[in-house]
Image (cartoon, helix red, strand yellow):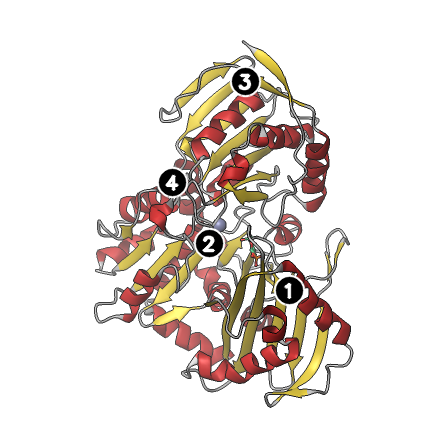
Amino acid sequence: MALKTVPTTAFPDQKPGTSGLRKKVPVFRQPNYVENFVQATFDTLPDRAGQTLVIGGDGRFLNREVVQVAIKIAAANGFGRLLVGRGGLLSTPAASCVIRKYGAIGGIVLSASHNPGGPDGDFGIKFNAKNGGPAPESVTAAIFERAKGITQYRILDVPDLDLDRIGETTLGDTVVAVIDPVADYAALMAELIDFDAIRRLFAGGFRMRFDAMSAVTGPYAKAILEGELGAAPGTVVNAEPKEDFGGHHPDPNPVHAKELFDLLHGPDAPDFGAASDGDGDRNMIVAPHLFVTPSDSLAILAAHAQRAPGYAAGLAGLARSMPTSRAADRVAKKLGIQAYETPTGWKFFGNLLDAGLITLCGEESAGTGSNHVREKDGLWAVLLWLNILAATGERADALVRAHWAEFGRDYYTRHDYEEVESAATEALMQSLRDRLADLPGQAFAGLTVASADDFRYVDPVDGSVTERQGIRIAFAEDARVVYRLSGTGTQGATLRVYLERYDRDRHDRDPAEVLSPVVAAARAIADIAGHTGRAEPSVVT
Ligand code: G6P
Ligand code: ZN
């Protein structure tokens, strides 16, 4: 076997962000860029000899090439067994499932999530640890340090493997197993969710549409919804994963999944609509004539999870990221369980899940998940919704309204100011920080600031502290604004402004109207236009 040691020059910019190393495709196409990062990642695993490693991605442009490179470098670095999804595919939650099920030391997951793909789009390489979750900061920092000092990588000089045929090949001391990317995941879903109840639902004429957005969940949704559960053929649309996602932005929200959104708001609305993102970890839920915000979805799933076999014993606790609305907290209170508030980023749920402190968690950014894997899981959320609809016999919109009737409604919206100069957004945040102590008591657009702080998280499991995670402003009128800078963009800076207002009694108002004073207050407090030169956000969801 031709083991080669190749001299290389370090790249200074291989610093993983919120979800791994994410850059434009041309950056990854520089000679040795991928090789360096993969070798640096393996160098941080001193006990890798003989271990199992999982490799797969969301099928975007470069996916196949990078899978081949990762296989050859892994085989030259002493791994015993590589589990590679057929076609180089593995959704992010499926990768997490496979890592856990087979006791792998971790996995290389190739994705830039919901960012566009193609030759000018985005690409990403993420390392997941043996619990199946995104590597913690200590590990990503070590990878970055190593990448800055790398001088050589090891690789097997062998022809490309056939990724499309299930089976095993031996490369030196390493066995490479090409596996069905769906089977293990589907088996896990069948344990957690009452498939029989959903089969009866579909057999009774229930109609849904699942939009896979030409991304990785297509094969999963087809196999499970249409194959196992008997949904009508054609239920899953855009089911073929494409390297450029058909030119679309595979982000399941009312803007990018507009067709689905419009269908559910039109005269021939099916009973339920759902979509998932590029790598299958995000989800969007649409009831007939009613969009369900991710924050509400988490709360509703938590309130009814016990109806699914995997959660019949009840929930240990619940967690949401700080900018996610407080709807889940109200459910936790009723259930008598602890509610945790974490910084944005799925990795912060990892410790709580591993320690058994929580069972369900979610984020406003369309992520919902549970202790079954260590990633958010789009299709799982859809299946849990279907399980609940089947068990309650309720229409999805009626279920949402019943939830509001019981708990009140947290009206919610997010305004994104994209591709702003970094210096401008930094100045805006700094100016807010400087004024935190002065804000309480001041009134803006008829709302009075009750408290203002910069979110600081103390992990209840290991005591680690994460500072400066977003400015929170609470108003006396039961409203809240959060300002934070995105950690996932690849161009300029994105300011996110999260807006919410609670109403105990009135649930059918227009969210834009309810939130308009909160929007006005948010703009005034931070002088968004003054700092960014933007009078309006680029995206409202
Ligand atoms: C990724 C992470 C999520 C996180 C999101 C935040 O999708 O997996 O856990 O919520 O990034 O993105 P942002 O752009 O707001 O930093
Ligand atoms: Zn994603």
Mark 4 or mark 3: which comes first in sequence? Answer: 3
User: In the image, is residue 429 above or below residue 350?
Assistant: below
| Residue 124 percent across, percent down from the top left | 53, 41
Residue 528, quarter of the rendered image: bottom right
* Marks 3 and 2 in Cβ contact (< 8 Å): no
The structure residue drawn at horizontal position 32% and vertical position 72%, both measured from the top left corner, is 289
Q: Please give the residue where the numbered disc 1 appears in the rendered image.
A: 425
The residue at label 4 has a CB less than 8 Å from ligand 2: no
The residue at label 2 has a CB less than 8 Å from ligand 2: yes
- Report the amino acid beneath label 1: Thr
Closer to us: mark 1 or mark 2?
1
Q: Secondary structure at mark 3?
A: strand
Mark 4 neighbour class, 10 Å CA radius: few under 14, some 14 to 19, many 20 or more: many
Kindly identify which numbered label has been placed on residue 243.
Answer: 4
Q: CA distance from mark 4 to mark 1?
A: 33 Å
Residue closest to the far top: 1
Kindly identify which numbered label has been placed on residue 174.
Answer: 3
Mark 3 or mark 2: which comes first in sequence? Answer: 3
* Marks 4 and 1 in Cβ contact (< 8 Å): no
Closer to us: mark 4 or mark 1?
1
Kindly identify which numbered label has been placed on residue 23.
Answer: none
Total number of numbered discs in the rendering: 4
Q: CA distance from mark 2 to mark 4?
A: 18 Å
Q: CA distance from mark 1 to mark 2?
A: 27 Å
Q: Secondary structure at mark 4?
A: loop
The residue at label 1 has a CB less than 8 Å from ligand 1: no
- Report the amino acid beneath label 4: Glu
Mark 1 or mark 2: which comes first in sequence? Answer: 2
- Report the amino acid beneath label 3: Thr
Closer to us: mark 2 or mark 4?
4
The structure residue drawn at horizontal position 43% and vertical position 51%, both measured from the top left corner, is 277
